[in-house]
C-alpha cells in the first residue's frame, strides 16, 4: 500500500513540475523586434530579435565608440570601447541578449 501512495505522490509531483515549466515557457517574451538607432558621427546600432551590432558608414570623427543594448527581462549590455578612425566603414562590434533586444544606441568619446 505504501508503494502505491509513493507512486501517486511522485506522479503528482512530476505533473506539477511539467505544468510549472510549461507556464514559464508560455510567459517567456518572444523575440521578434528589429530596428536601428539614430546616427552618431555616421555610426549607428542595429538589432534583430536577440542580436545587436555597431556599424559605420564613413565615420565622421575618429574616437572611441561603444554600443549600449537595452535587453528585455535581463541586464543591459555595453560592449567594449572600440577606437575607429575617421572614414571607417563597416561593422565593428556584435553582441546578444538572451530574450530580446528592445533598442540600442551608439556612444562616442574622443
Image (cartoon, rainbow, N blue to C red):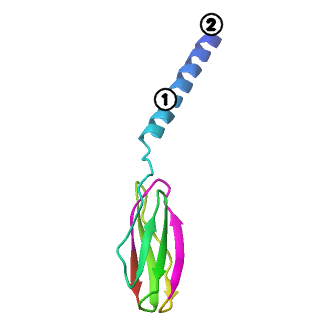
At x 42%, y 64%, the residue is: 76
The numbered mark, 1 or 2, whose residue comes first in the sequence reads 2
Tag 1 near tag 2, CB within 8 Å? no
Nearest the camera: 1 or 75? Answer: 75
Q: Secondary structure at mark 2?
A: loop
What residue is pinned by disc 1? 19
Circle 1 Cα neighbour tier, 10 Å, few/some/many (<14 / 14–19 / ≥20): few
**Residue 17 locus on image (x, y percent):** 52, 30
Residue lying furthest right: 3
Q: Is residue 46 above or below residue 29?
A: below
Counting the numbered discs, the total is: 2
Question: Magenta stretch: residue 101 in it?
Answer: yes
Q: Which residues are magenta?
A: 88-105
At x 58%, y 21%, the residue is: 10
Nearest the camera: 89 or 100? Answer: 89
**Residue 105 locus on image (x, y percent):** 38, 72
Circle 2 Cα neighbour tier, 10 Å, few/some/many (<14 / 14–19 / ≥20): few
Q: CA distance from mark 1 to mark 2?
A: 27 Å
Q: Is residue 64 above or below residue 17?
A: below
The N terminus - image quarter = top right
**Residue 32 locus on image (x, y percent):** 44, 52
Nearest the camera: 13 or 81? Answer: 81
The C terminus - image quarter = bottom left
At x 46%, y 86%, the residue is: 58
Nearest the camera: 6 or 32? Answer: 32
Question: Magenta stretch: residue 94 in it?
Answer: yes
Q: Which mark is residue 1?
A: 2
**Residue 40 locus on image (x, y percent):** 37, 81
Q: Secondary structure at mark 1?
A: helix
User: In the figure, residue 68 lies in which quadrant?
Assistant: bottom left
Q: Which mark lies nearer to you, 1 or 2?
A: 1
Amino acid at each position: 500500500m505504501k508503494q502505491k501512495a509513493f507512486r501517486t505522490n511522485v506522479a503528482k509531483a512530476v505533473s506539477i513540475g511539467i505544468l510549472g515549466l510549461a507556464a514559464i515557457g508560455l510567459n517567456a517574451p518572444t523575440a521578434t523586434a528589429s530596428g536601428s538607432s539614430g546616427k552618431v558621427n555616421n555610426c549607428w546600432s542595429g538589432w534583430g530579435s536577440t542580436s545587436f551590432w555597431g556599424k559605420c558608414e564613413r565615420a565622421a570623427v575618429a574616437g572611441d565608440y561603444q554600443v549600449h543594448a537595452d535587453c528585455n527581462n535581463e541586464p543591459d549590455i555595453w560592449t567594449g570601447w572600440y577606437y575607429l578612425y575617421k572614414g571607417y566603414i563597416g561593422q565593428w562590434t556584435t553582441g546578444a541578449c538572451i530574450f530580446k533586444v528592445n533598442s540600442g544606441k551608439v556612444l562616442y568619446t574622443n
